[in-house]
Amino acid sequence: MTAVADLSAHEPALELLKEAGNPFRNYFARNPDDDVCARYHVAELFARERSQLLGVVDLYRQTPQMPCEMVPILGNKGAGKTHLLHSIKHGSDGAWQLLVTPGTYQKDSDFMEYLLFQVIDTLLGGGKQKGRRPLEYISEELGRRLLLKALTTATPEEQLGLFPSPALGWLTRKLGLGSGQAQERTQWLVDNLSRPRQFQGGFAQLRRLCAESHLDGERASEFVCRHIDKTEEEHNTAGLMRRHLHQGFARAAMVGDESELANFLTYGFAELEVKVQPTRQDLVLSLFKVLLEVFQSLNIPVVAAFDQLEDLLLARRADDGHRTAEAFFAGIVQAMHQLSGVCFLVFAERGLWNRFIPSLDGYIQDRLNNPVHVPGHGTVKALRLEAPPAELVRRVTAARLSGLFDKLGEKEELPAFFPFTEEQVDQVARTEPTLRDMLQQFRHLFDHLVYGEVEKTAYDESPPLRANPVPRLRIAPVEEEPARIKSVVMVETPANSTDSTGLTMAGAGEAWDRAMAEAQAKLGPEGSVTGATRELQAGLGSFLRICHEHGVKVGPWRLQHVVPEWSFGEHPTYGVISIAHWVCKDGQPWKVGVGLFLGRGAGKPKDLEIKLSSLEATPPMIDHLILLRPDDDLALTGKSKTVWQDAEKRGRHARLEPVSAEHFTILYGFPRWLTALGEDLPAGQPLPNLADLLQERCEKLLEQVCMPCP
């Protein structure tokens, strides 16, 4: 009996399937945070490889100071690498770790700076790992330990000050009364803080405990900060950084105020008063090492996982791939030599890996190919993801279909794998090279069987239309039954809606909406925008580059040249801008610097001073400077106003542009959107022209980064 005949007995179910939609349409994960992975996860898929990687990560949990190592995870495009990474980052297997998954590679930046600010962005951002924000998890655990240590070493007088009597407090303290109650509350807190398990779940556990013991969060934070000042013995750069980090994490945990930590990680670390001012590279390395020390003291492994390496390194199809790859891998080797306790995971296409690695210098190859011994798994040098066997493909298929029938309530009455047959599922599993190819075939087959499209696939049971059938999808018209028109829908399609690559502008718009929704979630917390300063600047550079390459115009202005990132001076955070050469008709181009002016509080005048110093470069690099400032803090007062007025007196051309949260979201999500578009294109295909879409979605932002229209 043919597949069509089998389906005819289940017409009601087919009608329900038509309404529910094709469960194979979202057939692959676009990034390690895509919820498609969790929705259709099958634990048995790549279970061995997942266990091996978690074993590597656990080495850094058991031995925090272990030397940095790198493990490549290789597979064809669509093999399931991103899904595997998602299961490590968000799945229930294994303990919690700080997993950094960069969405961009800033090839023109110093690699240590790039990696440090990726860690800071992950720490302060709104993205969650295993259900918790990294800052919440780390600040809770560190705050618990710091408060416990401060309480156990406090004198009775300090305990009494921590829990003052509500009335006539000065008199009771003078008479020595109330100390017993303070000691009881202190002991209750100590007992509860000594149970770390209750801090591994839930939200704001430390604040809840303080409230239950009638300890004010501000008072607790000040108490811990005084304890840190007394016990931190080192007065060098590392000691000062450690003090600020501990105090910032403690305040985040006990008060819920993340701004102090965010400000220190953005600019405060470069403002420390030390006898010998370190260089930019020394500052970055010092902060990185101290930050790692904090994580290692909590037995939290730090994992830097680079996914979709081909898109990360080859963002521009015309780039010199070998040069970019060599800079990237040389940066990883540099980090391996200068840091300890960082595990590098590199998810790459096998062909890309085999093309780039043999061309690298010998010392880089030796370091990258160093095997890792994992107890219980032996020596791990590289993991290779192969096509799953038929049994696992059946489970993957069932996972997609079972959720559908759970909603429809038809599961018990229908055959397994309905509307497919088990033979069709096995045939796809035997003939397709990767999991993604299999899911694509199931997508087409589902449409054919359920929606009755006038198509046949190679997986129908009817006789093949070719003498030598091939395993890939083949479509031919069905001649046995004349087509019947059931309804007509008139759709107006813009002439430019589909590019020759096959990527529709509607599809690009959908990818845009997804990328911006993810960016908005990550920039939600208070200190996340500050912590994402370098990521936002990289997004700005990427935005200007694409506008240049795709011929975007703003009134009479067009871009003639773009430098995505230009680093200057000694400040790692503030000393970077993008440069855009705008030309109007036949006039001379204006070299316009565009930078993010995000400093708050004490960092505001310093940020402004450093950005304005870009106008003093010799020879001159820019003629005009545009500073993008959050629209809730646009006014210049005090020292900031003085710095601005001094620049005006020297004849410097600059202007402030108020930027909304929506536009920061665009800058943050833009590189990730480009990556998503690249995923939808055939290998080697350039992006379609995006000028119309950019001018529609970013009209206001384009006006802000351009010279005023004459």
Image (tube, grey):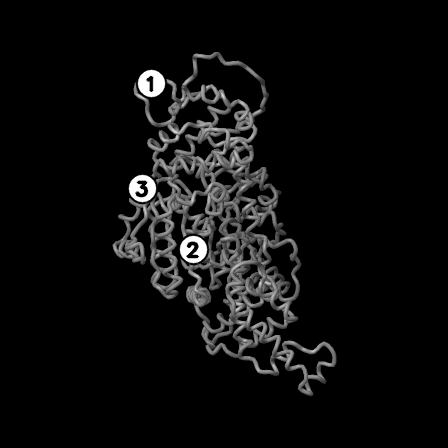
Q: Secondary structure at mark 2?
A: loop
Q: Quadrant of the C terminus?
A: top right
Q: Quadrant of the N terminus?
A: top left
Q: Which residue is mark 2?
A: 94
Residue type at numbered disc 3: Gly
Along the viewing direction, whichever of 512 and 17 lies nearer the viewer: 17
- Disc 1 to disc 2, C-alpha distance: 50 Å
Residue type at numbered disc 2: Gly
Q: Which residue is mark 3?
A: 351
Q: Position of residue 204 (x, y in %)?
A: 59, 61
- Label located before the other in sequence (3 or 1): 3
- Label located before the other in sequence (3 or 2): 2
Along the viewing direction, whichever of 281 and 407 lies nearer the viewer: 407
Which circle, 1 or 2, is nearer the viewer?
A: 2
Q: Residues within 10 Å of mark 3 (few under 14, many from 20)?
A: few
Q: Are marks 1 and 2 in contact (CB under 8 Å)?
A: no
Q: Which residue is mark 1?
A: 466
- Vertical placement of 425 versus 673: above or below? above
